[in-house]
Amino acid sequence: MKGTFPVNKFRELQTPFYYYDTKVLRDTLACVNRESAKYANYSVHYAMKANANPKVLSIIRESGLGADCVSGGEVRAAIKAGFPASKVVFAGVGKSDWEINLGLDYDIFCFNVESIPELEVINELAAAKGKVANVAFRINPNVGAHTHANITTGLAENKFGISMQDMDRVIDVALEMKNVKFIGLHFHIGSQILDMTDFVALCNRVNELQDKLEARRIQIEHINVGGGLGIDYDHPNRQSVPDFQKYFHVYATHLKLRSYQTLHFELGRAIVGQCGSLISKVLYVKQGANKQFAILDAGMTDLIRPALYQAYHKIENITSEEPVQAYDVVGPICESSDVFGKAIDLNKVRRGDLIALRSAGAYGEIMASGYNCRELPKGYTSDELI
């Protein structure tokens, strides 16, 4: 079944563009809030790296979520969108001095720290401002995830986090510093995870580390388990809202959270992935030696995931009801990897047809580039096109 799109409105717009269905987004946010509210000490932050479109951010901020940022630019965007600084966390393996100073100036809730050198810089910069910075340590739990190799983050070989064997030493260093306050542990094992046993494994590892720290009489106020929950790219209509009930229940069942602790989540793709589509126009239908090509005006500059991760996005011809034929759906970029899909069954394609690349709300617009001197596409919400 095809998605429902305001095709007549689309014909008035310059393609390619990103389209965000605000009903899907609001339904998703309502589900997140409903399911997380079942547990009194759960706090959800939106991972802004998934999509920082200002109109999308405004809707997410209105829902009451916090913001998870991985750059100074994202911190600025979060504050500009109205997220309270008290709900902003700043992660990232390489924070520059100006980015740390920005977080300090805004008095954000917490820095998720990934090394002793970073901790030392935060302490030094906070001291210069006469402030004390809240810090949580991102621990690399050496937990694998059933996902693409390029988006795993919790293995010992990954660049992210502090190794488990260094955890005690880093905490000891922090406790001796005057301008940082150690408040928690942070974890994140990867993205687009659909196998709940991966999150169970993370819970088990967090339990082990907590027991180890409590043996030293160290109590932690905040546990941050990151995000990682995936979406159904194959069936965006059938499952437009991920199974947050199961996701939060995994942590409620397997993580031994103490009564005084707050459990933080940093969900990105799961919140915005299904609300977005990349809308493109067919430039040409080209007959090759043994296949047909549908050549679009959108390319890997506008949705890089298929080229970067060999990722699948459901593709629909939203202006044709003719019988189905098979096409390689490609873009105009001078790169052989500029391919959205091969041997894709589409209703017969003609020049000028509109093509929707579904589930593009996450890592679509935010990763767009100007390669080949192409203009960045605009983003529209369904609220604007009513």
Image (spheres, helix red, strand yellow):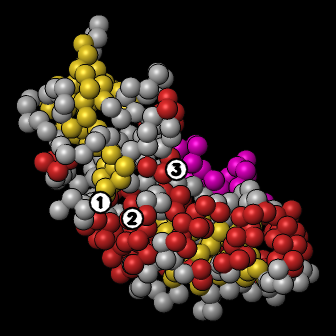
**Residues packed near mark 3 inside 10 Å, few (<14), some (14 to 19) or many (20 plus):** some
Circle 3/circle 1 CB separation < 8 Å: no
Amino acid carrying mark 1 in the image: Thr
Which tag is nearer the camera, tag 2 or tag 3?
2
Residue tagged by mark 1?
A: 381
Asked if the residues shown at circle 1 and circle 2 are in contact, with their CB atoms under 8 angstroms apart, the answer is yes
Q: Secondary structure at mark 1?
A: strand
Residue 365 in view of the camera: yes
Q: Residues within 10 Å of mark 2 (few under 14, many from 20)?
A: many
Q: Residue at x 37, y 49 (%)?
A: 378
User: Disc number at residue 108?
Assistant: none
Task: Tell me residue 203's x, y (percent).
Answer: 59, 70
Q: Residue at x 11, y 35 (%)?
A: 320
Where in the figure is residue 202, as x and y percent of width and height?
60, 65
Which callout, 1 or 2, points at the residue further toward the start of the chain?
Answer: 2
**3D distance between C-alphas at marks 3 and 1:** 33 Å
Dot placed on the residue nearer the N-terminal end, 2 or 3 = 2
Report the residue marked by disc 3: 146
Against 243, residue 153 (above or below) is above
- Asked if labels 3 and 2 touch by Cβ distance under 8 angstroms, the answer is no
Q: Is residue 154 magenta?
A: yes
Q: Vertical placement of 243 versus 133: above or below?
A: above
The amino acid type of the residue labelled 3 equals: His
**Magenta residues, start to end:** 139-163
Which residue carries the number 2 mark? 56
Residue 345 lies in the magenta stretch: no
In the image, what residue occupies the spot 52% across and 50% down?
146
Q: Nearer the viewer, residue 202 or 15?
A: 15
Q: Amino acid at mark 2?
A: Val
Residue 284 found in image quarter: top left
Residue 309 can be seen, yes or no: no
